[in-house]
Image (spheres, grey):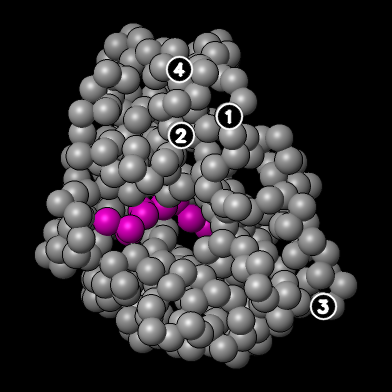
Amino acid sequence: MEYTTLGSTGMEVSKIALGCMSFGGGDDWMLDEEEGRELVERAIDLGINFFDTANVYSSGESEEILGDVLADYDRDEQVVATKVYGEMDEDNPNAQGLSRKAIEQELDNSLDRLGMETVDLYQIHRWDYDTPIETTLRALDDAVRRGQVRHIGASSMWAYQFQEALHVSDREGLARFETMQNLYHLTYREEEREMYPVCNKENIGVLPWSPLGAGYLTRPHDEFVTTTRAEHEVDYGTPYHEGPGSEEINGRVEELADDYGVTMAQIALAWHFQNDNVDAPIVGTSSIEHLEEAVEALDVDLSESDVEYLEEPYEPVEVFGYE
């Protein structure tokens, strides 16, 4: 395993973060408690020390499963991230969003499910247009001062919103966002235009979600649309395979995978590992075999010409992942 310093946090994290969205009930591709435990334990064996979840993942089951497993290990050796924003109770309008009330009660609930007194990274899952960012940041700053949260982070939003939040923190002397978790992969690179220059300037750690395009970059284009996960993504409206250059990029990933004798997923992840914008991609998987392949991708050394070859067909697409 390789490790990197996460933005300005000073924390050393594995260059792969295990995404835990697949833990809990729901779709066929999700993992029950026993399967989730096996995956986390194997991740730790492989040297992964960074785990990302959220309160809305399976309505809290993901946090419960992750917390139960990590309770058997030295807590000081693990870096745990979770999120707040999404609806947790359709009958309670205050169980969502980024108001002080929502943040304080949902943080308490997340810590209870995780079985922890402190979470290493607490992220806002999206921007709350109904709550002033000053209110949100003061609530998060208080959580840091209480010792419930070590660092705060943000997720998919417009760059101007992120810069505004950083400015408010600096002006008011509040804890500032130190990480950005956003959509980024070979067939969706819109974040390079504005968000990543901000992150580079402000020393923000970058944690791409869906680094494999929800599986689109793991198999040939024609095969992707036949999978159950692909049906879910198409219904959700994700544009991974719809960009003008997406099919060509997919074909080039397949070509390089053949040349290197590795999987398409390993080529797509190697691109992340060698990308100066990225600290650690969030790799979500329901398979131990695929997790092991992801770790092995750290050994794939793409040449500069390979990277240029993969990136060359990309054309702008409509912004996706936030409103």
| Residue denoted by label 2 | 239
Label 4's element?
Answer: helix
Q: Which mark, residue 249?
A: 4
The Cα atoms of the two marked residues, 1 and 3, are separated by 37 Å
Q: Earlier in the sequence, mark 2 or mark 3?
A: 3
Looking at this view, is 40 or 64 the one in front? 64
Secondary element type, mark 3 = loop
Label 4–label 1 contact, CB within 8 A: no
Q: Residues within 10 Å of mark 1 (few under 14, many from 20)?
A: some
Kind of residue at badge 4: Ile
- Mark with earlier residue (4, 2): 2
Q: Which residue is mark 3?
A: 173
Q: Is residue 288 left or right of residue 239?
A: left
> Marks 4 and 1, Cα distance to the nearest angstrom?
14 Å
- Expressed as whole percent of the image width and height from the top left, the position of residue 133 reads 72, 72
The amino acid marked with disc number 1 is Val
For the point 52% across and 57% down, the residue is 12
Q: Which residues are magenta?
A: 11-22
Relative image position of residue 21 (x, y in whole percent): 33, 58
Picture residue at 78% right of the left edge, 71% below the top:
169
Residue, far left: 34
Question: Vertical placement of 79 versus 281: above or below?
Answer: below
Q: Nearer the viewer, mark 1 or mark 3?
A: 1
In front of the other: 38 or 49:
38
- Which of the two labelled residues, at mark 4 and mark 1, occupies the earlier sequence position? 4
Quarter location, residue 240: top left
